[in-house]
Image (cartoon, rainbow, N blue to C red):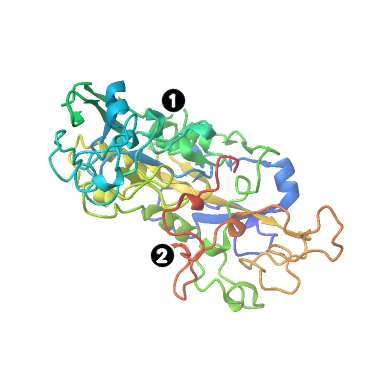
Amino acid sequence: YTLHKANELGTVECSVEDVIDVPDTLDSTRDITCFMEAEEYALFFNGFKIKAVSDPETCDFITTTPNSYYRLQPGVTARLSGEPREVVKFVCTDIALQNFGSSVVPSFGTNSSAFTTLDELCGKYVNIDGTTAVSFGTLNLSASAVPVALDSESELCSFDYTDDDINCDEGKYRLHTVNVDAPGTVPALSAISGGSSLKECGGNVRACMGGPASPIVTGAGFSFLEGVDGLITEIPIAGGSTNALSVSRDLTRDSNLHMSNFMRQCSGMPNFTSVTNFNTSPTFSPGYDADAMDEYVRLGTTLPGGGTTQEKDATHGQFDVIILADDPWRAGIPDTTVSGYVFDDPRREWSNSRMRAQPSHSFECLDRALDVKARIRLVVREWNRNFSPTTQEFRNISDVFSASAKMDAGSAQTNPYLVFDNFNDVADWDDYLVFTNSATSSCSLSTMDPAIFPIRSPAWFPGKDH
């Protein structure tokens, strides 16, 4: 393992000097990024521990903010307004099914053609269209697209990932029970004779988070005063250190996404398919630009559409969901949008400030008023082949185009009968996600590659085991 200041040879210490007061603006001497370099399987097998150390009379407090990302797509079951999803459950009597189960159903609204017989509705759960008044005589279903009937109430919370035992859904739904009887020759829809009830999904949007920060930010006792997505350590006047940030070994994981937070596509380097932008020597790349990644996180998501019902969720095909992340880092409704909501609007809980991921491991040196005197952001890079700490060139963002690549070596060894016959044996973020190349920006402003998966697809999230 080699720890050094970014954009420098591995011999430059990861430290900030002359930390005396709180500046109005943190410049590059007080706000630095450091790399920790490690071979991929050593990192995967051992993990790492790291802590921040303060000299005497330097830091009064130090915050430790571990890296985080969303491993599953967070969202809420709700209309765009933040109001609950409205759902109808059809309960049919035996005589109605017996006499009219295969009959053409009466008019159920604009898209009633989705259900041609009564038994296609009985026992099912269907969204009510929110753009018109609800009428249970001629039931209004979704007017914007053909609705999907669900078999179970457990499917009504779109971001409760039951199979993964993770519930990220803070939304609500209102369930109306409609009894279908057959008193005469035509099946009749009663009013809401079965009653209506408001139910909470009961999840936590941060439960979808992964990375070393996830045990902190998803805990019941998390609060701002414990640190922004982290912990605060008081430092004696004689100096001291934080507890070690431990990113522990877990061989059940499928990749190094938990261990390594580096991504060359999000490094601040535009045109990341260009050879010269990555490994041209002696004109070195500017190194990893942590501000670019932080800005990318701050962008947040926008609420698409303009109607009451939003896009469907990808799992159950249901309307009335607010998807709260486009990819593992960009999450939450933009703060500028949230600021326009009234005080008791439920959507205020899903702001970018509350939900944003943390792209780096961050250590902030604070005074007694909790103002920042200095900051160190740590980026962990995993290497696909062994490197020499004394001779390796660390100033390039990546050597992906080099004939002798070590960091991003992707070719296989020549013997096809080897058990581990690839140089790239453990996936990192650049292996997992592919962004659209841009001549003017890195992933901070570009969109995901639509040829791989469309934007906002759950496929952009690595899953529970990462």
The amino acid beneath tag 1 is Gly
Badge 2 or badge 1: first in the primary sequence: 1
Residue 49 lies, in percent from the top left, at 66, 40
Judged by depth in the image, the label closer to the viewer, 2 or 1, is 2
Residue 422 lies, in percent from the top left, at 77, 59
**Left or right: 24 as drawn, with respect to 282:** left
Q: Residue at x 68, y 37 (%)?
A: 250
Mark 2: few, some, or many residues within 10 Å (few <14, many ≥20)? some
The residue closer to the viewer here, 23 or 384, is 384
**Helix or strand or loop: what does disc 2 sit on?**
loop
**Helix or strand or loop: what does disc 1 sit on?**
loop
Q: Quadrant of residue 368?
A: top left
**Left or right: 270 as drawn, with respect to 102:** right
* Image mark count: 2
Identify the residue position indicated by label 2 in the image: 445
**Left or right: 216 as drawn, with respect to 240:** left
Q: Which residue is drawn at 20% across and 48% down?
A: 110
Identify the residue position indicated by label 1 in the image: 221
Q: As displayed, is residue 139 above or below residue 43?
A: above
Mark 1: few, some, or many residues within 10 Å (few <14, many ≥20)? few
Looking at the figure, which quarter contains the C terminus? Answer: top right
The amino acid beneath tag 2 is Leu
The residue closer to the viewer here, 129 or 102, is 102
Residue 421 lies, in percent from the top left, at 81, 58
Can residue 242 be seen in this snapshot? yes
The residue closer to the viewer here, 308 or 424, is 308
Residue 400 lies, in percent from the top left, at 66, 69
